[in-house]
Amino acid sequence: MTVQGFRLKYAGVSLLVFALPALAPVPGEAAVGPVSCAVSILYKPVGSTNQLYEKQFQVAVGQKFVDDFSTTTRQHIFTATLTEKPKSVVVDIDFFSDVSTFNFVDLATSLQIYNFDRRGRAMGSHQFGTTLSAGSYTMSYELKCLKGPLSGL
């Protein structure tokens, strides 16, 4: 950063004036670079075939990552966004999957990475049970994110 200064004289008073470059981000530009992530989501129904979704992606502030992998009969979509907060960034994901004629699963979670950290990781699982065996399932996920390129994951 360079500082430029000059002296003004007005009515016998000498003023030293400094011109500082703008410290705020340029409008339309994000203050932080993109974040690289890897997600793994496993839907494990009782008595049926498991469904595994794995994806590596990059997301930037103000942009939305969308992976629509729907078929002609089932809707499946994954989205991710990055939000800048004071002293951190937050990755939000949403996974929607139409898993059968009468059932769908929808998973949403957030991962906050503080400025002094370079990476973050979130994991979790959810279990649903009913007296009908076709309605019981376990769903688990892992989300890993890194400030920087995908190669660092």
Image (tube, rainbow, N blue to C red):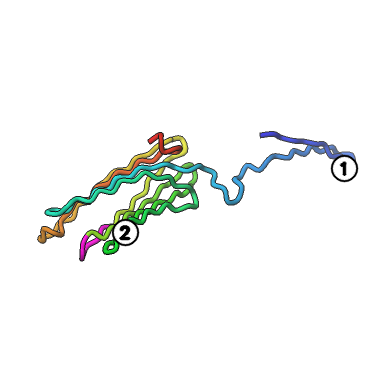
Q: Residue at x 40, y 37 (%)?
A: 119
Give the overall secondary structure of the magenta segment: loop
In the image: residue 42, left or right of residue 143: left
Q: Please say whether residue 103 is one of the residues in the magenta stretch.
A: yes
Residue 9 drawn at (x, y percent): 87, 39
Q: Residue at x 31, y 58 (%)?
A: 76
Question: For the residue carrying disc 1, how many other residues have a C-alpha within 10 Å: few (<14), some (14-19), or many (20+)?
Answer: few
Residue under pointer 1:
10
Task: Check disc 2 and give the amino acid type.
Answer: Ser
75 lies above or below 139: below
Residue 83 drawn at (x, y percent): 46, 49
Residue 75 drawn at (x, y percent): 30, 61
Label 1 residue SS: strand
88 lies above or below 63: above
In the image: residue 116, left or right of residue 44: right
Question: For the residue carrying disc 2, how many other residues have a C-alpha within 10 Å: few (<14), some (14-19), or many (20+)?
Answer: few
Q: Nearer the viewer, mark 1 or mark 2?
A: 2
Provide the residue span drawn in magenta.
100-105
Task: Check disc 1 and give the amino acid type.
Answer: Tyr
Tell whether label 2 touches label 1 (CB within 8 Å): no
Residue 3 drawn at (x, y percent): 71, 35
Q: Residue at x 50, y 42 (%)?
A: 33
Q: Residue at x 15, y 56 (%)?
A: 136
Residue under pointer 2:
70
Identify the residue at the far front of this view: 72
Label 2 residue SS: loop
